[in-house]
Image (spheres, helix red, strand yellow):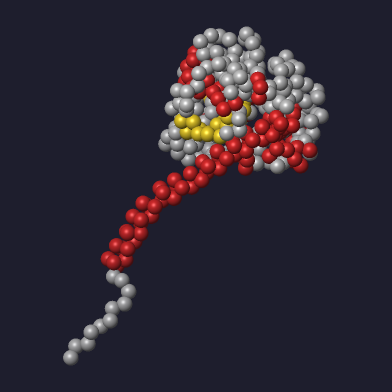
Amino acid sequence: MSRLRSRFGFTLIELLVVIAIIAVLIALLLPAVQQAREAARRSQCKNNLKQIGLAFQNYHDVAKQFPVSISWSGSDDFRGAFSDKVFLLPYLEQNTNYKSTDFATGCGAFDSGGWNCGGGNPNIRTQSVRFPMFLCPSEPNVVAGGQANFNYAINHGTSHLNTTGSANMGAGNGSHNGVASFVQGAGAPANHWLRSDQSVTTGKISDGLSQTALYAEIQIDYLASQPGPDPDQRKRRTQVHTWAGGTSTQATRLDCLNQTGLSGRPNMRGRAWAWSFMGVGSAYNHTMMPNEKTCHSYTDDWGGSNLMAAGSQHDGIAHIAMADGAARAVSANVSNEVWWGIGTRNGQEPVPNF
């Protein structure tokens, strides 16, 4: 009489089939997991801008004007130029850091790249902090070791009125040096040859708070030595290119798009949130469309005509905060007229829904 044998375990073929099924399931699930993670990062990025927009409103309630976006030291030195982010700290639950800031010396604002007084800066401790509220979680790049990096900048308007050569006004403080008139912004700058001394209040945003951009995402400049592939050319769009200019907003934009040479100051944009120097991208400009090329301004390093474009690592969008405190996503394919229109605070341009 034959005895039946009990079989335990799997055959090699069965194991291979199970492994293949698991691999297929992982391949199917991985994109969904990655999309879910990016959705969470995108939501946090938008929320950061929402908090910055609300901080501007709270600052305005107390000071009756928007904060300074270029603030000079007591010695009137470029190196002491504080960004608006410094003055927003008390309204972003960072009052201790704000109270510890040294506003009196010529080395006031800290630059993590070492241009701004290097190791002798008195504000290294307070301004070398890597604040999550100033960083988009989707940003993969870092500069100067990552300390003090940031992804959000104030709006400096457009380089010109759309059809003329006159300077235009944005929601960020800056000036045109050597052209017809100043670009005013969301601050109260001290009297200086590069800037106007007019404060900006919500009442001066005649286009409407909900129709005027205040802040936007920017991308940190890509380190040329950073390893890894760049399959979708994101590296190139984050790099700052050389000087560009023109006689109108469109002409200036096209001139920047035609630039092939990179900036002589690489790896600066996004590295020092406390410093208001245009080289570190403390302000952005609506001359360039979202995610377009970024260039240096044709006027000066500190003026409102800078050609730093808004941009993000999100697919097809960039987040902005409006002057009323609302945050929203804008398509990278937004029309030129709409983007230029929301970039100015009193241009009287009709801005359709976007």
Q: Tell me the residue at 46%/30% (across/down).
A: 331
Q: Is residue 139 left or right of residue 61?
A: left
Residue at 46% x, 47% y is 36
Count of numbered badges drawn on the protein: 0
Q: Quadrant of residue 209?
A: top right
The percent coordinates of residue 63 (x first, y second) are 74, 29
Q: Position of residue 344 (x, y in %)?
A: 57, 20
Q: Is residue 198 above or below residue 105?
A: above
**Residue at the (61%, 28%) spot, across then down:** 323
* Residue farthest along the left direction in this orientation: 1
Q: Nearer the viewer, residue 232 or 287?
A: 287
Q: Give the position of the N terminus as an image quadrant.
A: bottom left
Residue at x 62% of width, y 21% of height: 205
| Residue 7 visible, this angle | yes
Estimate the x, y position of residue 337 in percent, counting from the top left. 48, 19
Among all residues in the image, which is located at the extreme bottom? 1
